[in-house]
Image (cartoon, rainbow, N blue to C red):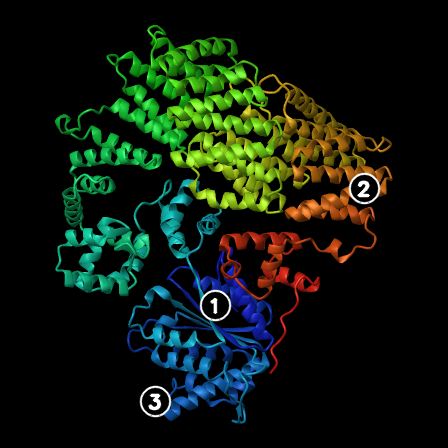
Amino acid sequence: MPTTSFTTPFIGREDELARLTRVLDRARAGEARAVLVAGDAGVGKTRLLAEAAGHAAEAGTTVATGHCVDLGDVGLPYLPFTEIVGVLADDERFSAALASHPVVDRLLGDGGGGAGDAGGRLQLFEGMASLLTDLAETAPLLLVLEDLHWADQSSRDLLRFLLSRGILQSRVRSRGGDAVAGGAPGQRLAVFASYRADDLHRRHPLRPLLAELVRLPVVERLELRPMPDGEVARLVRAQQAAPVPDATVRRIVERAEGNAFYAEELLAATSETMPGAASAVPSGLADVLLIRFEQLAATAQQVLRTAAVAGRRVEHDLLRDTVQLPEEELESALREAVGRQLLVPGDDDTYSFRHALIREAVYADLLPGERVRLHRAFAGVLAGRGHRAESAAERAHHSRESHDLADALAASLEAADHAGRVRAPAEELRHLEAALDLWSAVPHDARPDGFDTVTLTLRASAAAAHAGETHRAVSLTRSALARVGDDEDSELAARVRYTLAGNLMRIDNLAAAFTYSNEALAMIPADPPSRTWVWAAATHVMAATYMGEDEAAHRVARKAVRIAEELDVSDAQADLLISLVSLEGRSRRTPEGRARLREARELARRAGNASVEMRALFNLSIGSHESGDLDECLTWLTEGLERAGRAGLLSSPYPVEMRYLRSLMLYTLGQWDECLRAAETELDGLPTAGRYAIGPALSVALARGDQHAVERARALLDGPFDWMATLVAGLLLTDAAVQRHDAEEALEQFRTTLTALIDDAGTTPHVAVRLAALALTAIGDAVVESRRTGDEEGADRWTETGTELVELARITANKGEDDTPQGPEGLAWLARAEAEWARACARPDDEPGVGVWEKAVAAFGYGDVYEQARCQLRLAEALLVAERRDEAATHARTARDTAVRLGAVPLLDEVERLIRRGRLAETPSTADRVPLLTARENDVLLLLSRGRTNRQIGEELFISGKTASVHVSNILAKLGAASRTEAVAIAYREGLVEPEPSASG
């Protein structure tokens, strides 16, 4: 039985657990093996071994655990083995075997007496091997040795004997004392031993033993690397019943760096000081982290304290110039810190702390005066290097911490300039905000010339917008507005207002945006013409259009375009041309409209205004999408995102929407694996306000039966209102209710989402058609169920509700946001809504709704393969009712093929139920029973059957571990397997892989 109980679910480490489970399976079959489990303290070794032990116990294996304890240089001999024998002695099944071996008395009685001489030790070692052999004949056995880094010399020697000569290798003594050769055939035994990799300094006594053991063919090493951020986040959320704020989770994940114990401790400390995340290292955790630091010599401690002030990473030259030690002493101290696994040397002449929390603990341990002195020393060294861009940010930090605020202000502005030049808006924002914080604390005569708080705040708001921090951009611009005094010039006051209006539009506060853009336009005369008036006009045109003031917007836009041309303000001219596309009825869906957008894009490109260029490229891509030209859409998206990457604008609003749209195209076209890969690679780079861009990947997960997608969709609604996040979450949550056949929930999600998405002008968004069609699906199910149970009143009530929804869908599809009919996607969803409504209205004696479902199937033929397959399922049902069995079978098989290719398990289950219920495949072949795997998935499945981890699969197939993981997930979905082990079992049963030939004796 496991020796440690846990109250939270086992999260992550599936590959590692599967590897240990395979070893246990082989051990039960008579192939004895050992696994050495390595990992840093707190990374999850104990939890993994406990989980493996639980699996072993459930399968009938007896588990005995022995713990090594840190008792200094002279520990108790054979302590873990004594504990193991004690556990086994409590099991009556083993009483006869234990009674026949004197080694039991020697371990449990006098602690191994008589083992001091070589002969006595050999007798004890061979006696232990013989005992374990006999015990394994009674029942499969798993020995777990924890914390091997603390093992005493005697225990290490016994383990060496058992693994190299005893229970696992070529010579084992039988009960009668005769030697038996042949690699311990039939030995039902496994040994799992864990140790801390970060405790093994160069002279640690365990190192030579490990080097010897890992060369043995029956011993393998399993390294537990830090957990991925996503798994740490799941672990944090699983620790508490109440929801943990996203910001808190992100902060803990960032600081824990994949260490489960650190994450749990940080969460516990945070929970005690709610709200907000604790900034300091919790005292209990700090004590743990400082143990190894306090074992260093005084000089090495001094060097490490200095390095901690520098940050997580420090250059050798900078550390040398600051610590001011003789070179030999510094090198000796660094060698000691590296040997103790506190610092890690880098390839670029740098040193990094092995874990950020070690650095935090050492830094927190500094005395206040010591901390100020060291920061001042670093700032002085950096100042002596001149005004180099790369050191400005560091100098600003050290000057601030040493209370030299004037230098901190100057350095912050230098760092902001550098970040702006290299197109790093998030860093530019951070430095500008630091400068604004310092401004009032620095005397007027010590401030740099040529700066004022209003223009600095405007610049910070632009950086925030480019970094995707839209709510922060609004807050900063409001702050700039508050700082504009009555004596400020009208141009600056107008700039602040139209900048605020632009930022408010990004967070869908359209009425306020219209008010401020109106004020900005009124503050500056159009004559004489000025750049400021042109930009104020361009912003006002956009705000007025959003508010439905098309006539006024068109009048201002035509005038502003002429003035922009006269003044050669080509980027403002481009912005106005984009707005005029819809105002002049061209529509971005038409060739004429897209030609105008290409003209605007070229003007913005020549002017070097990447933000306006992004707006043009976004409209080109969305116009292609709305017109059903998905290939052209992907072309524009690829070009737009490449341009955004070069300009450092990938996190700004339009590129984030393009990232979402690209994922949506991949989802729509059925390229689901690529959609998941895109989300996995881009997630960390998305701003908080852009998390909705992973929505299509969540749709893939939901369609494949992953209910975690629902939780992640709900998380998109946390924080301030975001229109796109609300749209994406609403679609997912409505569809999830449809999958559960929960009409009440689907209708509630439809209404809640639509209410939130209707703008200040009362415009119903295009997505209302899709939302209505999804809700109608659940309503149709509810009507069918009500009629089946004789609840005619309930059926009539749901039919009435369905009629309201289909009417809304019709109106919205035929008169969209710009008073024109929707494109192929919207019309396809309208066809789906009409078909679902017909199903809801149908009476038992009505004609089957074959025609409406044929229209829906044809409508989704523009490229949406999954929705077309869902409609084909309904069409097959209708055809079956109409007794058109051959046609029904054809559509059912087509839907099934699509579901198999996509890994859409819930849809596949529905289709197969229909095929069975309708007897559409009386004699299924193997090809019908087993979904088709791609050539690459077959390669992965073969390696999976041979026990490879995702990383090993990637190495053998020359793909990344993440890509291998995606292939494994697809295989599990296609085979309908809940685990890797079940997938392999299905593969063997269905003949997808052949068992490896066994080696001849």
Q: Position of residue 855 (x, y in %)?
A: 75, 30
Q: Earlier in the sequence, mark 1 or mark 2?
A: 1
Q: Is residue 543 above or below residue 920?
A: above
Crowd class of label 2 (few under 14; some 14 to 19; many from 20; radius 10 Å): many
Q: Nearer the viewer, mark 1 or mark 2?
A: 2
Q: Which residue is mark 2?
A: 888
SS at mark 2? helix
Picture quarter with the C terminus: bottom right
Q: Which residue is depicted at the point 18% across and 30% down?
A: 441
Quadrant assignment, res 933: bottom right
Pointer 1 with pointer 3, Cβ within 8 A? no
Q: Position of residue 19 (x, y in %)?
A: 53, 65
The three-letter amino acid code for the residue at tag 1 is Thr
Q: Which residue is mark 1?
A: 3
Task: Check residue 116 in the rendering and tell me which mark sits there, or answer none.
Answer: 3
Quadrant assignment, res 689: top left
Q: Which residue is depicted at the point 33% across and 66% down?
A: 199
SS at mark 3? loop
Q: Earlier in the sequence, mark 1 or mark 3?
A: 1
Q: Which residue is depicted at the point 42% across and 76% down?
A: 213
Q: Is residue 191 visible?
A: no
Please tell me which residue lies in front, 683 or 752.
683
Q: Is residue 148 above or below residue 971?
A: below
Q: Which residue is depicted at the point 76% across and 46% down?
A: 893
Q: Position of residue 874 (x, y in %)?
A: 75, 38
Q: Is residue 146 above or below residue 570?
A: below
| Left or right for 249, reference 832 | left
The three-letter amino acid code for the residue at tag 2 is Ala
